[in-house]
Image (cartoon, grey):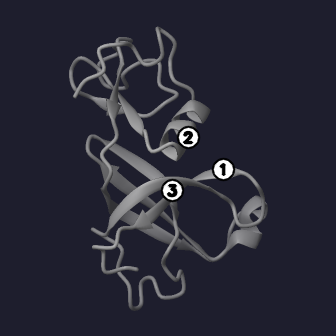
Amino acid sequence: MTDEHPATDGQPASYDEWLDAIDAGEGFYLESPAGVGSLPPRRVCPETGSTDLTREPLPEIGTIDTYSVVHVATPGFDADAPYVSAIASFGPVRITGVVRGVDPDAVGDTTDLIGAEVRVTVETRATTDDRLVVLRPTDSSNDG
């Protein structure tokens, strides 16, 4: 299903608008006429250079492609460690987020997240009120 209108009435979607849409259960990505997907705040297709981007609904379920367990974080995130950071494919786009709903200390030993099905949400950091992209394993995933 294609939204025939440009990203936001001729204006590119902002990152905050994208987070708001995910939080409202209306996640989207931007697509060029060639079918290349990207995420806001894109103004131009990274592959074709087209500025004619339309909103497409973000698939509800993605799969984790790769992940890292962060035990030693940068100073701004050290109080949040340990945590799992992952990249997941949602149709034609890849989303980076923090994985919640799994024990970071068990990942890699007893839990392998590669291929795990996840949903994208917007939550706040454990130590601040900053919003962040969160990937949560689905009930059908064996990761919790």
Camera-nearest residue between 74 and 92: 92
Res 114 quadrant in image? bottom left
The C terminus sits in image quarter:
bottom left
What is the CA distance from the residue labelled 3 to the residue labelled 2? Answer: 12 Å
Q: Name the residue under label 2.
A: 19
Left-right relation of 47 to 70: left
The residue depicted at 27 percent of the width and 68 percent of the height is: 115
Kind of residue at disc 3 = Gly
Q: Name the residue under label 1.
A: 131
CB under 8 Å between discs 3 and 1: no
Res 73 quadrant in image? bottom right
The residue depicted at 47 percent of the width and 10 percent of the height is: 9
Q: Name the residue under label 3.
A: 97
Sequence-wise first label, 1 or 2: 2
What is the CA distance from the residue labelled 1 to the residue labelled 2? Answer: 8 Å
Image coordinates of residue 90 in percent, x first then y, are 31, 48
CB under 8 Å between discs 1 and 2: yes
Mark nearest the camera among 3 and 1 is 1
- SS at mark 3? strand
Mark nearest the camera among 3 and 2 is 2
- SS at mark 2? helix
Image coordinates of residue 5 in percent, x first then y, are 35, 13
Camera-nearest residue between 140 and 91: 140
